[in-house]
Amino acid sequence: MSKKKFSEVLSLCYTDLLYHSRIHRLATWESAGHVVWVKREDESGFGISGCKKRKYASLIPFIFSNDYKKVVPIGGQHSNNIMGLVQLLHEFRIAYRLYLKSAHTHTPKGNAAFLELLTDTKKNVRWVLSEDWAKVEEIAAKENPEKHTLILPEGSSHTAAIPGLITLGIDIERNEAEKKIHFNQIWIDSGTALTAAVLSYWNIASGRDTTIHTVHTAGSIIDFEKQFQLCNHFFRTNYAPNNVYHYSPTTAKSFGSVNTSVLDFVTHFARTEGILTDPIYTAKLFMTAQAHLLSTPPQGNTLIIHSGGGSGLTGFLPLR
């Protein structure tokens, strides 16, 4: 697929929601010949940051172009996506009702606290029990039958988000051109897997030889493959995912779990590299990438994408 074809997706985006994030080297990681860079998607903002903002850049125009009057986002009370999306739904005056997974406790910490600040949870939230979560989309569709209603799966994993997410790859190529380098491997975390799948699709469709390493902090390879097929459907292609490797986190493998090792890494990484990570997603990404790099020979330039989500860290403070 031509680069011109990818650039055409910009017409489907609100470009003021897109961000050219910088890259820089990780000074303390460059041992045994490895050259490691980090892409600072986290610097695009606090409330709405990183790859989520790219999703919204094409999702919001899609809502208006299809004349949706109401949006029904699905997720958890600590979701980075829910917290970020609600801000834009207010900004653009789009009616919404949240379908959130009922937790054992509703103690407002981290993103849950921000969400209570942003919306009247008694009015705008429908809590769904854990035992019913597998059919939450079906429940949401049944309870919101209005014609002009958009049901948004967890993580806003919708084809409408693909044009915005493709700009991550376009921006990486800009980084390479500016630094006069080529990334031999790229690491990214994966929740609902759409961002990782779009990155892999861009890599293949662009004819690149870069290896993509995906750390599944939530979801699975099956989720990744489904999202990859969404890309094929959107661009009307028939690519197969290749040159992609999948990993579980090195520790605290189940989604949402956090242990002392993860929290210690968050502190150490902040103090040595000046980078804030959250214990659910990005800390596990960096930990897994570091373990792999320490056990393998150098493979040229490595890029680790810091996908944002720093607001989630606030739910764990103080760490000690």
Image (cartoon, grey):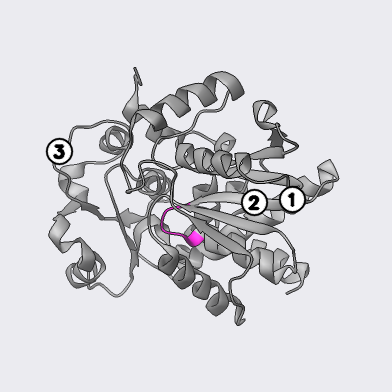
Cα separation, mark 1 vs mark 3, equals 43 Å
Magenta residues, start to end: 190-194
Task: State if disc 1 and disc 2 touch (CB < 8 Å).
Answer: yes
Relative horizontal placement of residue 61, taking residue 312 as reference (left or right): right
Relative horizontal placement of residue 34, taking residue 276 as reference (left or right): right
Above or below, comparing residue 143 to residue 74 in the picture: below
Which picture quadrant has residue 279? Answer: top left
SS of the residue at dot 1?
strand
Above or below, comparing residue 243 to residue 105 in the picture: below
Q: According to the image, label 3 marks what residue? A: 105
Task: State if disc 2 and disc 3 touch (CB < 8 Å).
Answer: no
- In the rendered structure, does residue 286 fall within the stretch colored magenta? no
Q: According to the image, label 1 marks what residue? A: 183
Residue lying at 48% horizontally and 71% vertically, measured from the top left: 225
User: For the residue carrying disc 3, how many other residues have a C-alpha within 10 Å: few (<14), some (14-19), or many (20+)?
Assistant: few
Q: According to the image, label 2 marks what residue? A: 186
